Image: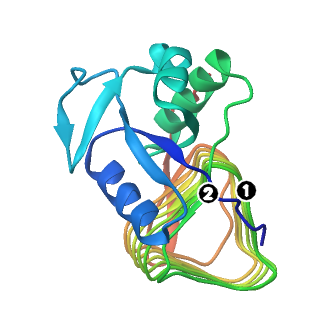
Amino acid sequence: MQIQTLMNNIVLFGSAGHAKVVADIVEQEGLYKIAGLIDPNQPTGAEFFGYKILGSDDELPLLIKKHHIEGGVIGIGDNWVRYLTAQNILNLVPDFCFIKAVHPAAQIASRVTLKRGTIVAAGAVINSGSEIGEFCLINTLSSVDHDNMFEDYSSIMPNAATAGHVRVGAFSLLGMGASILQKVHIGKHTVVGAGSVMLKSAGDYSVVIGSPAKVRKTRDKLR
């Protein structure tokens, strides 16, 4: 696992419930100081969970200079909205530094790769040989077993678990309490329903529900 270097001020993008969780992870980890929040849907100066809104995404270049910002993290739970936010930030500031945030109560094996922008919440376990892509969410008390691959912008919800050699496609979501058996591959933009038990692989843009889980419908393709 890559070692993060100490920064001073960072910003947190978002101000809703998931952003509150991410703020706590950053605070508990103790590597960065949150200078404030960036949220285009909230008025500048409004306060959420102890932090003020500094401005909107479009003001980022000016805010970086004003508040001596050295990086940031996205506190948005929806995979696609998180992607759009990241792309907007990179369009404005191409070399913007996105940090990883890992709660001290998470258990990360020594041979795990975590890429930029990824969040690992309290009680999560990621076992040896697994690779977690960019801007992924590994949520509270979730379990990722050995040799898994989570592609960019994918997420696993609280109390969900994967067995060994599972692959989760980009933008896909494993719902709360879902169980994914060994060597199952999940396509891109696929949703696995809460409490579902996947015995077989599923393709892109699928909605997978049940125990045993079956593809119930397909999702509209995003651009």
Q: Which residue is mark 1?
A: 115
Which residue is painted at 55% across and 63% down in the image? Answer: 31
- Asked if residue 3 is positioned above or below residue 204 in the image, the reply reads below
Q: Which residue is mark 2?
A: 100
Which residue is painted at 55% across and 49% down in the image? Answer: 8
Give the SS element for disc 2: loop
Q: Quadrant of residue 52?
A: top left
Label 1 neighbour load within 10 Å: few <14, some 14-19, many 20+: some
- Quadrant that contains the C terminus: top right
Tell me, yes or no, if residue 76 can be seen here. no
Seen in the image, is 116 located left or right of residue 147? Answer: left
Of residues 196 and 110, the one drawn nearer to the viewer in this rendering:
110
Label 2 neighbour load within 10 Å: few <14, some 14-19, many 20+: many
Marks 1 and 2 sit apart, C-alpha to C-alpha, by 7 Å
Q: Quadrant of residue 83?
A: top right
Of residues 131 and 50, the one drawn nearer to the viewer in this rendering:
50
Q: Position of residue 142 (x, y in %)?
A: 48, 78
Give the SS element for disc 1: loop
The answer to the question of whether label 1 and label 2 lie on touching residues, with beta carbons closer than 8 A, is yes
Seen in the image, is 219 located left or right of residue 100? Answer: left
The kind of residue tagged 2 is Lys
Seen in the image, is 191 located left or right of residue 134? Answer: left
Tell me, yes or no, if residue 62 can be seen here. yes
- Asked if residue 38 is positioned above or below residue 63 in the image, the reply reads below
Q: Position of residue 160 (x, y in %)?
A: 46, 76
- Asked if residue 121 is positioned above or below residue 73 in the image, the reply reads below
The kind of residue tagged 1 is Lys
